[in-house]
Amino acid sequence: MQAFNYKFQQLEPLKSFKRVPVPEMYVPGHRTCAGCGPALNYRLVAKAAGKETIFIGPTGCMYVANSSYLCTPYAVSWIHAQITNGGAVASGIEAAFKVAARKGRNTGVFPNIIVMAGDGGSVDIGLQAMSGMMYRNHKVLFICYDNESYANTGIQTSPTTPYGAKTTFTPPGKEIPEGKVLFPKDPPQLVIGGHPAVKYVATTTIAHPLDLMNKVRKALSQPGPTFLHMLATCPKGWLFPEHLTKEMARLAVETGMWTLYEWENGTYKYTNVPKKYKPVNEYMKHQGRFAHLKPEHIAKMQAFVDEKIKNVKQAIAVAAPVPTARQKA
Amino acid sequence: MAKELIMTGCRAAAEGAKAAEVEVICSFPIRPYTAIMMELAKMVADGELNAEFIHGEGEHAQLSVVLGAAASGARAYTGSSGVGVTYAMEIYSPMAGGRYPAQMAIADRTLDPPGDFGSEHTDAMCTRDQGWLLGWADSPQEVYDNTLINYRVGEDHRVMLPQMVCQEGYFVSHIPDKVILGDQSQVKKFLPPYRPIGPLSTTKPVSHGPQIRPDQGAPMDAMRAAVFLDVPKVIEEATADFNRIFGRNYDPFVDQYKLADAEIAFFVMGAHANTCRKAVDRLRKQGVKAGMARLRWVRPWPTHQLANALGHVKAIGVVETSTSYGGAMRGGNLIHELRASLYDLDQRPLVTSFMAGLGGETIWPADFDYMAKVLTEMVKEKKTKRYVYWIGM
Ligand SMILES: Cc1ncc(C[n+]2csc(CCOP(=O)(O)OP(=O)(O)O)c2C)c(N)n1
Ligand code: SF4
Ligand SMILES: [Mg+2]
């Protein structure tokens, strides 16, 4: 049974924007907010993955705002999953395609199976299903599009909402002036730390489209489970003007609020590391969710980020930016 | 060649799944159904079954995995017991609403608290309004048979619904009995391959489960309800074919025992029917005109078949092995729907209920004698004095 040779896809890296496939697999007509980061994210992921793809979409903005009124923007197959079970539904789909291949019912290439889950659907209520899928070594790419809140239900705090953010469940007040008092979970580290079957994990943002698409293609060229953590800025939830969607993601990297890296078989490779980090307030000051913070809160955030980027500087060599090396499955 | 073996209900379920050539199996341990998965795991390990055997991380995942598999065109199989059945609750409706005809084997078990391994129908009965096919077997043989019959009915394009194939924990799941396993040529004749409708595919892109407008909700619900109007016909066809091909003699909906001239009747589900039949025989010898109706399907509920089978009886005792705390009759579940089924008859039987077999307790022959006494008094007094009697306390 193990010996069967499934026709897994190998997707070449895109050397430049000129090589990016023209066909759109995530087409217009959805109802996301103007300037929606996750929608742009979806478009880039779908483009990079191509036609032979199946998306699993757990409940969240990328379900509700994309598939309104029985219409969907997916030019490839897509199935709704509960917010709880993206990883498990994907496991069943992958298993079905494996049996179909073994029995000769499906002789074509093995589909790219991609879960496109929000932060809640990935590392909070969806964590168990994601972890189970990864542990069991299913050939599935799990993407956490991180808009840093339970956005679809009206911007409630999630485990990736940053310290100090105002959400509808963490309103700042006299007793709790910061709003959110906890520091966020680290999704890639959750995956890397406990899933031996996962050999490739990477982070990216919507402000780095070629990097994003190449990480998708590299992840999809692996024979087993992979994980991508994508910063997908959300003007509605973070309270910034929608024309700054890309700018916010870029500033996140320039301030160290977000780091771009690949982790491959135990080795980290950081990219787009600024020569000199900007202060975090350069990022925070644009966003209404941080508007209530006092200087001491911002200092606390700066200390958190300083600690985080220490790792980047000390432990890991800065490597060349994309394109990434081709994978051998 | 068909062969006759001695086996438990769990083994019979696994043999049924193997005969159906299930392709994706998802397990999670909980007694007593676990033994079904142990059997299947061994069949896969030994290369007797070409299936993906997936260790789900819980029952919620089990259901999710088989949903994904069925959506992708694979015949999928899972199962559970007790709190495992309720842990998966979120997924029952998406599975039925998405029309994914996977199968779930249940060896039933009490819910907590307290921890109790005993059989009780309450676990699977909790799911009865989620749109699944649902029914109980009374023996390992019927477990095997129902596994095949349910795939045939569930995968019929007029139906396309998931199925819950239930047996009582221990009474059926763990007590060996004679089982005739069909020959694979009989199985092939009875059960065609699963033909999914609009499965996930890279050549024909589809969207499964988009959001709707509120005004699209009612028509969709009406469609889901309407399917159940067609199901009885499909069950009748499938049962007739099954009886013919495998040489059995099932009534599609209601197993009727000495009902034709009965004045009092027990209304039961599952293996307690075996004790009940003996009780009926004994009561008959004592001159009591007793009979038994055993329900084979809870969903679809056989409303008219029950009215036909039981309409002439004077008093019916519903043997309830599930709870409906605070329900209309203050006891179990079945009595509500049985009473509703009889309501339009000109001459309605009197109906009461007996809470029996709860916590996995045996329902003893003497318990049926007591029930018969209550029913006989009801007939004499022409009145239902109480809606519920708690047995064995
Ligand atoms: C079991 C369950 N609990 C709660 C909800 C309500 N709910 C719908 S969307 C959503 C937010 C999802 O957040 P996330 O996964 O981060 O995606 P986003 O909406 O931010 O894109 C929630 C909590 C649900 N659909 N299912
Ligand atoms: S709330 Fe945020 S994530 Fe959701 S649609 Fe609007 S911009 Fe996109
Ligand atoms: Mg979110």
Image: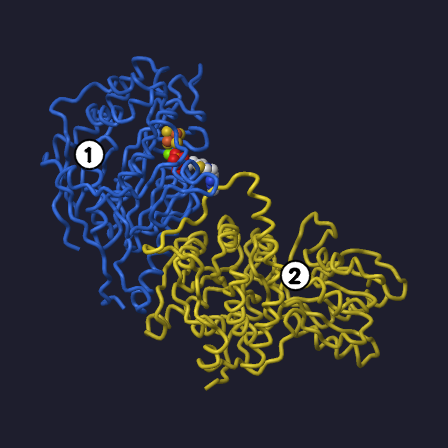
The chain identifier of the residue carrying mark 1 reads: A
Where residue A283 appears, x then y in whole percent? 26, 20
Q: Amino acid at mark 1?
A: Leu
Q: Establish if A160 lies above or below B324.
A: above
Q: Establish if B255 lies above or below A251.
A: below
Where residue B302 appears, x then y in whole percent? 67, 64
Residue named by callout 1: A260
Mark pair 1, 2: CA separation: 58 Å
Q: Depth check: A114 or A171 in front?
A: A114
In contact (CB < 8 Å): disc 1 and disc 2? no
Residue A149 appears in the rendering: no
Q: Is residue B240 left or right of residue B265?
A: left
For chain B, give the colour: yellow
Residue found at the far right of this picture = B381
For chain A, give the colour: blue
For label 2, the SS is loop
Position of the N terminus of chain A by quadrant: bottom left
Residue named by callout 2: B301
Q: Quadrant of ligand 3?
A: top left
Q: Residue at x 12, y 45 (%)?
A: A325
Where residue A228 appears, x then y in whole percent? 26, 41
Q: Establish if A46 lies above or below A272.
A: below
Q: Amino acid at mark 2?
A: Trp
